[in-house]
Image (cartoon, grey):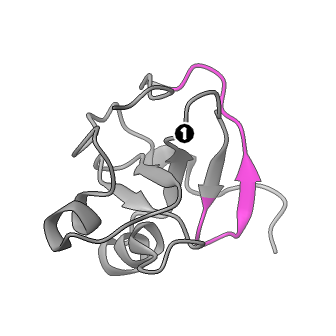
Amino acid sequence: MNQLCSHLDQIQAVQPSDTRGCTDCLAAGDRWLHLRLCLTCGHVGCCDSSPNRHASKHAAESAHPIVLSFEPGEDWCWCFEDEVAFEVDGLPVEVTEHE
C-alpha cells in the first residue's frame, strides 16, 4: 500500500450526478449505506459496505480512482488504486450536504 496518492492530478471541480443518493441504486430501486463522490466526473455511488458497491465499480470501470465521502460532516478521500485515505485542503468542490 502506498503512503501517498499518486492520482491527485485527476481531481476536478465536479457537480454531483445526484444529490438524493447513489445514482445507480436510485435507477435500480436499491438501497445504500453511505455515499461516495467521484472527484474526476461527479458520479455519486454507494460505499463498499453497501450491497452493490457502486463507487468501487465505477472506479474500476472508468479508471477514476479518487472518491470523496459524500456524507454530511465528512471530508476524507479514498484512492481505490493506491488504497490510501487522505484529506485535501482546498478541494474544488463543496459536498458535505445532500438531500
Q: Is residue 26 left or right of residue 93?
A: left
Q: Looking at this view, is 74 or 11 the one in front?
A: 74
Q: How many marks?
A: 1
Q: Is residue 75 left or right of residue 57?
A: right
Q: Looking at this view, is 5 or 27 the one in front?
A: 27
Kindly indicate the quadrant of the structure image that contains residue 13.
Answer: top left
Looking at the image, the residue that sits furthest to the left is: 27
Answer above or below: position of 90 versus 23. Answer: above
Image coords of residue 48 (percent x, y): 57, 73
Residue 76 in magenta stretch: no
Q: Looking at this view, is 4 or 22 the one in front?
A: 22
Residue drawn at x 32%, y 49% is: 21
Crowd tier of the residue under label 1, counting other residues whose Cα lies within 10 Å: few below 14, some 14–19, many 20 or above: some
Residue drawn at x 82%, y 75% is: 1
Residue drawn at x 32%, y 57% is: 22
| Magenta span | 79-91
Answer above or below: position of 21 versus 64. Answer: above
Query: Dot 1: what SS?
Result: loop
Residue underneath mark 1: 71
Viewport quadrant of the C terminus: top left
Image coords of residue 85 (percent x, y): 74, 54
Image coords of residue 95 (percent x, y): 44, 29
Identity, as a three-letter code, of the amino acid under mark 1 = Glu
Q: Looking at this view, is 64 or 6 the one in front?
A: 64
Q: Main secondary structure of the magenta part?
A: loop
Kindly indicate the quadrant of the structure image that contains residue 89.
Answer: top right
Residue drawn at x 23%, y 44% is: 18
